[in-house]
């Protein structure tokens, strides 16, 4: 048996084990599967992601304890969304356990490549320019005629829509000898063929003791893939699933996928629609929201680029550019608009002069800073890093107080000058004394095991104050708490955590669910004056208001207007095909938002 021009090759593949401390049976099924794999002595074992249930340290430890010594050095991994969605280390924990999330190695005559499509704090997949450049370099070094197999968490093409830039992948691999993709995520077995490429999605070990075996076929020069189910006594049942041809000239037919049925950016739906005017690009993704500091607009990227610019007629004029570590959340701005506080996954908050971009100070938080800093009127900057809530002096960066032992938070606090209000992944909303950090009250929003609390807590909530209440949110809904006591006044159902709430006046707040239901809600009793369903998923990008209009940036790049008086839908425009998590701002009639392709977009709004 030979793979291409190499020796015989045997690959074992698993996916979606979801090992969790509270997930009964998952570790036992995995031990059964790994034991069966070890007896087959494969050349390589690949795990296609969702290794853990929540990405907690104890889940990684449990997983590693299950790995048999006989497979040491032969197991490779790629991360899944469950490794990064609630991860306060920004993939640091994954790397410390498994090394780089992208890798390539030769196995017999096959080039095996592991790809990382995951996005810190987000669920869908994205290759990104950096990931595609890395893959281009790898494929460029592969000897002509050598078959390439990709391993990743998210499937692409064939009706899958979890990856926004899958077309760029197909454009790239059309020029190389990529023959197959193994993927997980969907927890079901599918075989799809696009051009010369065969994709196999895998059943989840979470549901049954199952793995996949790919072996080179002696007569046809192909990988024959079978599903192997392991009985309690170790007996194996094999079912043929797919055949992946390996020989050829190393070039597959050109493929286009992922854009069918989608309108192009700029396509509008009516006479009073917004109109894209300009855009420019930063390194990485513009995942954090856009901030405004006086006359300067500030955007940061996961590539560590922070720019200050002004929106000019028909374009944008860059004022300054600064490099820091990766930025995943919006910068904070002081009341005077003179200083910008940039959170970074390199474990620092950077204070920048808003006019020049000069770094005035940096504070080492000891963990990635994945929350949006709040600059209070009292000259204090409040933010979360790891499981700590910290307050530093806005002028000097000197630590004022610290609250340890809380849950992770990627949201933003609120303050009325007397107290600071926060939510965290331990299931609580809290109030702290603004001067000392001492806890004033705590309200338990979610109870249960660690996985349940992490998923359903307010870990990503942007806290809002108004009418004497604190509005905190989870994926189940919003709750209004008495600012002085923490007592619950009312609740509003729906996944309202990711799109930030907007205080409209002293009587109402605008709440948006992640599935696109927008409602104007009374601060007094939580009753909705109106509700409207915009028919689009909305995540962290959310809503910005312009007079009597709200503009909602959907996760899939469509900007939709909603009238604040009655919820009537106004014009809309498709801004980008990339995912959007970046909270927009409006400056001089231009809405400014970022996307995961790294673009900052300027969209002219129609006259009111």
Image: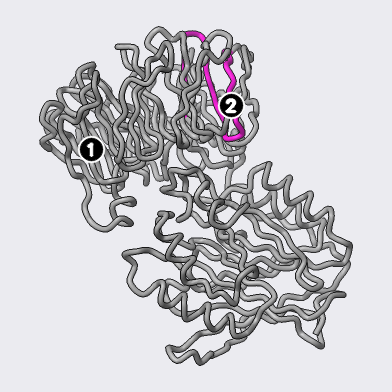
Q: Where is residue 382 shown, x and y percent of the image?
A: 35, 24
Q: Element at badge 1?
A: strand
Give the magenta range.
289-311
* Quadrant placement of the N terminus: bottom right
Q: How far apart are marks 2 and 1 (CA)?
A: 31 Å
Q: Residue at 40% of width from left, 56% of height from top? A: 54
Residue under numbered circle 1: 429
Q: Residue at 63% of width from left, 18% of height from top? A: 321
**Mark 2 closeness class: few <14, some 14–19, many ≥20 residues within 10 Å:** many
Among the 4 quarters of the image, the one containing residue 71: bottom right
Among the 4 quarters of the image, the one containing residue 491: top left
**Mark 1 closeness class: few <14, some 14–19, many ≥20 residues within 10 Å:** many
Q: Element at badge 2?
A: loop
Q: Is residue 327 above or below residue 25?
A: above
Among the 4 quarters of the image, the one containing residue 551: top left
Q: How many marks?
A: 2
Residue under numbered circle 2: 324
Q: Where is residue 122 shown, x and y percent of the image?
A: 47, 46
* Quadrant placement of the C terminus: top left
Residue 267 in sight from this viewpoint: no
Q: Where is residue 281 shown, x and y percent of the image?
A: 65, 29
Q: Does 88 sit left or right of 419 as displayed?
A: right
Q: Which of marks 2 and 1 is in front?
A: 2
Q: Where is residue 417 shown, x and y percent of the image?
A: 23, 16
Viewer-proximal residue among 430 and 360: 360
Q: Does 421 sit left or right of 191 as displayed?
A: left
Q: Which of the marked residues, 2 or 1, is nearer the chain's N terminus?
A: 2
């Amino acid at each position: 048996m030979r793979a291409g021009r190499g020796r015989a090759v045997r690959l074992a593949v698993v996916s979606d084990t979801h090992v969790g401390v509270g997930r009964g049976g998952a570790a036992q099924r995995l031990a059964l599967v790994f034991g069966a794999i070890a007896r087959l002595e494969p050349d390589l074992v690949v795990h296609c992601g969702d290794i853990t249930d929540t990405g907690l340290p104890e889940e990684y430890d449990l997983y590693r304890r299950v790995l048999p010594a006989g497979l040491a050095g032969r197991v490779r991994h790629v991360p899944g969304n469950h490794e990064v969605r609630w991860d306060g280390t920004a993939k640091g924990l994954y790397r410390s356990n498994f090394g780089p999330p992208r890798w390539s190695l030769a196995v017999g005559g096959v080039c095996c490549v592991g790809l990382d499509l995951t996005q810190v704090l987000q669920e869908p997949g994205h290759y990104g320019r950096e990931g595609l450049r890395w893959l281009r370099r790898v494929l460029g070094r592969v000897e002509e005629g050598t078959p390439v197999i990709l391993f990743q968490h998210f499937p692409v093409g064939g009706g899958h829509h979890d990856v926004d830039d899958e077309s760029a992948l197909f454009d790239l691999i059309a020029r190389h000898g990529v023959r197959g993709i193994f993927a997980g995520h969907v927890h079901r077995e599918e075989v799809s063929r696009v051009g010369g490429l065969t994709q196999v999605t895998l059943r989840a070990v979470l549901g049954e003791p199952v793995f996949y075996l790919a072996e080179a076929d002696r007569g046809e020069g192909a990988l024959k893939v079978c599903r192997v189910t392991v009985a309690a006594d170790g007996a194996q049942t094999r079912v043929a699933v797919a055949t992946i041809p390996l020989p050829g000239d190393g070039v597959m037919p050109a493929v286009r996928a992922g854009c069918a049925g989608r309108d192009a950016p700029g396509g509008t739906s009516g006479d009073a629609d917004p109109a894209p005017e300009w855009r420019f690009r930063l390194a990485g993704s513009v995942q954090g929201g856009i901030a405004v500091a006086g006359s300067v607009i500030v955007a940061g990227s996961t590539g560590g680029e922070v720019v200050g610019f002004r929106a000019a007629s028909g374009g944008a004029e860059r004022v300054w550019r600064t490099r820091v570590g990766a930025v995943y959340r919006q910068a904070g701005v002081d009341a005077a608009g003179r200083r910008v506080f940039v959170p970074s996954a390199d474990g620092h908050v950077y204070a920048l002069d808003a006019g020049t971009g000069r770094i005035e100070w940096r504070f080492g938080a000891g963990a990635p800073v994945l929350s949006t800093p709040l600059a209070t009127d009292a000259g204090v900057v409040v933010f979360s890093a790891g499981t700590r809530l910290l307050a530093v002096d806005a002028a000097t960066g000197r630590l004022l107080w610290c609250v340890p032992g809380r849950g992770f938070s990627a949201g933003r606090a609120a303050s009325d000058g007397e107290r600071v209000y926060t939510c965290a992944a331990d299931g609580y909303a809290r109030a702290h004394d603004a001067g000392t950090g001492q806890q004033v009250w705590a309200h338990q929003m979610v109870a249960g095991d660690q996985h349940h609390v992490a998923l359903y807590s307010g870990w990503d909530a942007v806290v809002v104050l108004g009418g004497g209440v604190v509005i905190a949110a989870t994926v189940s809904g919003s709750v209004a708490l008495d600012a002085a006591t923490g007592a619950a006044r009312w609740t509003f159902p729906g996944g309202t955590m990711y799109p930030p709430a907007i205080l409209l006046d002293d009587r109402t707040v605008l709440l948006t669910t992640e599935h696109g239901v927008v409602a104007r809600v009374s601060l007094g009793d939580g009753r909705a004056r109106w509700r409207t369903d915009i028919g689009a998923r909305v995540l962290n990008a959310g809503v910005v208001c312009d007079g009597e209009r709200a503009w909602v940036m959907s996760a899939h790049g469509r900007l939709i207007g909603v009238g604040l008086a009655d919820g009537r839908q106004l014009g809309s425009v498709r801004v980008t095909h990339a995912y959007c998590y970046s909270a927009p701002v409006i400056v001089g009639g231009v809405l400014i938002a970022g996307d995961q392709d790294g673009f900052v977009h300027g969209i002219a709004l129609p006259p009111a």
